[in-house]
Amino acid sequence: MMLFRRMHQVDAKVCQVNTTVQELISAMSLLANHLPDPSLSPPSPAEPPVLLGDETAQLVELEALLASSLQRLTIAYFLQGIDVTSMSGNRGLLVIGDASGLIHMANRQLETRAFRAHDHFVSHVIMMKKANLLVSIGDGKDPRDPELIKASKAIADASRTQAQQDEVPQPSPSLYMSPLGSTALVKIWRTDQQDRDGKPKLLQQIKIFAKFPEEAVTAFSVSDDLAQIAVGLLNGAIILFRSDAKRRSDKPPLLLQPATQYPVTSLHFATKLNVPTLYAATKRGLTCYHCDDSSRSGGMPRSVVLDERGVALHCGAVSEDGDMAVGQSDAVYFYTPEDRSVCFGFDGDKKYLGFFKQYLLVAHVDPRGRHQVNLYDLQNKFIAFNWTLTNTAKGGGGGGGRFGDDAAEEIRHVVSEFGAVFVQSSLGYVYRLLEVDTTSKLDILFRKHLYSIAISLAFSSNYDLTSIMDIFRAYGDHLYQKGDFDGSLRQYARTI
């Protein structure tokens, strides 16, 4: 079922706003091995599909409705010509860090403004959920692979040239004039306040390597209360910065994990049962640190090794429940702060993992080597969205898609805000996925006679009881027409 509409926004090729919208409707075959008979015992609305041992997750892939738009929207303005290094979204802002030290911010109307945040480049940005605060890391050593740096710069340069020809508004050239890169810094900005230069107000900056050898920053996380900041390094070390809210002072940084030969690939703060925890992943394994009051007072947090398998970059994410999800080649595994939990059998070499509302977003490489994006509704047991990146362009190696051999399109950054998911690809394109409303989802389910899934979706969407009773009644009518009189009576009984 395509419960999302995809808007393809081209950064260099399309030159008019509001150009033709092409809609293509493609019917995707039902997964015969995964589709349960609706007349059999319907699943509980709250029962998630899980993979335990050799058990396969039961997910239904439904008919797809794909809306493709080749519109040049204002989102192209701040990404056209920008060498994107990081993205984040919250509090009504999309935030983009680039390789020249600028941070670009876009509002719901995709109107953008840029300011110089760091001298040389921005490696990470996090827009906080509970306050109008932006935390960034920049300068020092670039953590990206040299080939990726080269390819990304080539795409940005080509796009910038096209933007100049199209007379697309660009940040002032003076913003790109920066001094030599200095040591890596964490900076905390107030996005709803400005200084005299019109930049977000800088509240604090922290030297990451004041007491440690300089190294490239590969992962970064901030606790919701801003009391703890974790920085993961290329050499495998993790540095924890803590503040004392009562004394309004900062404690000395703590070397949470010593250097190893395995880079840190993922850091995520979460709160489970009112206990702040830090999930830390490297290419060797996954560990959870319990960063409670005892650790904040200066002690070393208690740690639990959750898995000894390595975690790839961008393949770890935390759910709203505070559980860690990790994408491996054979499945997506979930972890609590103490142990491994359930897992879901999604095959494929994972490239990105994230959460959007109730959906698990998984980007992986299909058997043909193409990047594919799936959104899974784990609670209601269906694949909500399936999309394969099929664009290729001249370029390989350093060209990243426009100079030389054909290069397949890959996913670079994914961020959600404004009720949508934004995907930036290696070719510089931006895609926006918009969720279809619940009524449209239910209509698709009704057409496929998948009433048990429709009932589950209606419950999880807080539909009114009268409407849910109507679905039970329609389910009963469907079973009656099939000759399943006992099943229809059970559905009718639920309407009483």
Image: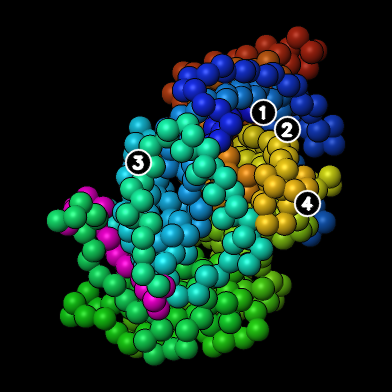
Q: Quadrant of residue 74?
A: top left
Question: Is label 4 in contact with label 2 (beta carbons under 8 Å)?
Answer: no
Task: Give whichever of discs 3 and 4 has the lower sequence position.
Answer: 3
User: From what the image shows, is residue 113 above or below residue 350?
Assistant: above
Q: Earlier in the sequence, mark 1 or mark 3?
A: 1
Question: What whole-number distance in Å separates the C-alpha atoms at marks 4 and 2?
Answer: 15 Å
Q: Work out whether mark 4 precedes mark 2 in sequence or the reverse, and give the earlier one.
A: 2
Which residue is located at x 65 percent, y 84 percent? 261
Residue 347 has which mark? 4
Q: Could you tell me if residue 299 is visible in this image? A: no
**Residue holding disc 1:** 1
- Tag 4, which secondary structure? loop
Q: Crowding near pointer 2: few (<14 within 10 Å), some, many (20+)? A: many
Residues at marks 2 and 1 touching, judged by CB atoms closer than 8 Å: yes
Amino acid residing under circle 4: Asp
Q: How many marks?
A: 4
The residue where tag 3 is placed is: 112
Who is closer to the viewer here, 55 or 178? 178
* Residue 265: percent from left, percent from top: 59, 69
Give x and y (percent) for residue 352.
Answer: 63, 54
Identify the amino acid type marked 1: Met
* Left or right side of 197 for 127: right
The residues bearing labels 3 and 4 have C-alpha atoms spaced at a distance of 38 Å
Task: Kindly report which numbered mark, 3 or 4, lies closer to the viewer in this rendering.
Answer: 3
